[in-house]
Image (cartoon, rainbow, N blue to C red):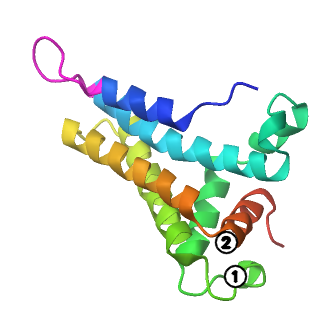
Amino acid sequence: MAILNPQHLLEQAERLVEPPPAGPPRQVDIRRAISSAYYAVFHAALAAAADEFIGATVRSDARYGLVYRSVDHKALAEVCTEIGRPRPSPRYVRYSPEQGFGEDIQVFASIVLDLQGKRHAADYDPMIRVTTADAKLAVGIARAALERLGNAAVAKRKTFLALLLFRPR
């Protein structure tokens, strides 16, 4: 399976906002850059979940694709929202780490929600005008999110990924 490399998505976003030979970058490029920044964290979460439960060494296996494709944007937002609450809802509290998810996962979750909102605006709101600075900020916080996900305590990260894949009832 050829998964999207989050770093490549961020590099693409940076290229999109490079000044063209004449004038500023076009709105379509700036908006696409913001969208790519969100997709970098989205695909990082999907790959982390599939790597954890199927294995990074078998990315060409159909089971890997099944896990990778099982998460949608709404599910990611729901889990990230729960992580951001002072106390998770009854559905989630049973599965949440006793001492919470920790700063790294909480920051990752917060950035995911922020970037998802920015992506929705960039992709669907014809009334806004985004700037190169907006796109560069989105790329910067996406890079921070990837670092936080990678640095998270193993048990807290695994719990986050499990909740991403398996909806509590």
- State the image quarter where residue 152 is shown: bottom right
Where is 41 relative to 27, above or below? below
In the image: residue 59, left or right of residue 156: right
Three-letter residue code for mark 2: Lys
Per the model, the C-alpha gap separating discs 2 and 1 is 7 Å
In the image: residue 135, left or right of residue 89: left
Q: Which residues are magenta?
A: 16-27
Image mark for residue 156: 2
Q: Is residue 42 visible?
A: yes
Q: Secondary structure at mark 2?
A: helix
Q: Nearer the viewer, residue 86 or 41?
A: 41
Residue 19 falls inside the magenta stretch: yes
Q: Nearer the viewer, residue 7 or 139?
A: 7
Residue found at x 25% / y 44%: 134
Q: Position of residue 49 (x, y in %)?
A: 73, 51
Q: Residues within 10 Å of mark 2 (few under 14, many from 20)?
A: some
Residue found at x 75% / y 41%: 68
Q: Which part of the image, by quadrant, shows the N terminus?
A: top right
Q: Position of residue 156 (x, y in %)?
A: 67, 72
Where is 58 relative to 49, above or below? above
Q: Secondary structure at mark 1?
A: loop
Q: Verify CB contact (< 8 Å) between mark 2 and mark 1.
A: yes
Q: Which part of the image, by quadrant, shows the C terminus?
A: bottom right
Three-letter residue code for mark 1: Pro
Q: Which residue is mark 1?
A: 97
Q: Position of residue 99 (x, y in %)?
A: 63, 88
